[in-house]
Image (cartoon, rainbow, N blue to C red):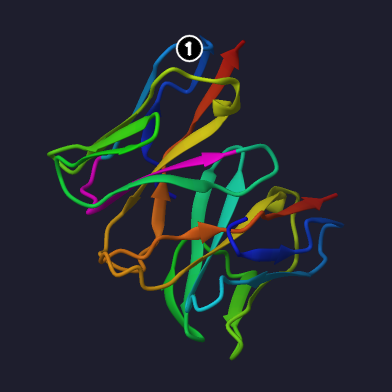
Amino acid sequence: GQQLNQSPQSMFIQEGEDVSMNCTSSSIFNTWLWYKQDPGEGPVLLIALYKAGELTSNGRLTAQFGITRKDSFLNISASIPSDVGIYFCAGQLGSSGDKLTFGTGTRLAVRP
Amino acid sequence: DSGVTQTPKHLITATGQRVTLRCSPRSGDLSVYWYQQSLDQGLQFLIQYYNGEERAKGNILERFSAQQFPDLHSELNLSSLELGDSALYFCASSGVSGIGTDTQYFGPGTRLTVL
């Protein structure tokens, strides 16, 4: 099945540093979402983007919907130990109730 | 807590067997989605039900089937299990958000191990 290209694959950073990750697709999506998954848990929605060019923040997290509709990025500022986990982007083609196509994931480790 | 429940949490079985995974959506959500997460394929969409009817199909094997019952809970049936079916199976549900896109909330998953 299709997976979106997400980079980097993993990151090991110092607490307090900023983090950037991105996601690209060969096809257009009308909605981009970013999820975080902790070990043994299901993905939890962090940010949803509905409009090309949109920039949305959720606390220390900022995400943007690329103007080509084929990419998105997520920034985490001033990382803390609880940011550890796997971050997934997901694209949604339809406007309502459509399946999610997930990225390959970025594994984040934070060194105190 | 997303409000989506899945049982069992863990399932260990042998090749050739059949298992049933259960999902209860968030209260009021009409859509249920099933996803499979494996190391080599990542998170992949399997199938979606809306108010009891199949709405969309993804990379679901013919050995797998699902249904959504009148009380909106859903079951994913996996039969003739193979070693490669070992994975995490997630259920997600969504309802009308009013924004034009239904946010999908994921359950904690069922970890299936086929020996």
Q: Where is A21 relative to A49, above or below?
A: above
- Mark 1 closeness class: few <14, some 14–19, many ≥20 residues within 10 Å: some
The image position of residue A60, as x and y in percent, is 40, 29
User: In what quadrant of the picture does the C terminus of chain A appear?
Assistant: top right
The image position of residue B85, as x and y in percent, is 69, 53
**Residue A33 colored in magenta in the image:** yes
Q: Where is B27 relative to A13, above or below?
A: below
> In the image, is B83 to the left or to the right of A97?
right
Q: Give residue A77's quadrant in the image.
A: top left
Q: Amino acid at mark 1?
A: Gly
> In the image, is A54 to the left or to the right of A12?
left
Circle 1 chain? A
Q: Give residue B61's quadrant in the image.
A: bottom right
Please, which residue is most extreme toward the front here? A59
Residue sitting at 58 percent across and 83 percent down? B72
Q: Which residue is mark 1?
A: A16
From which residue to which does the magenta span run?
A26-37
The image position of residue B48, as x and y in percent, is 47, 71
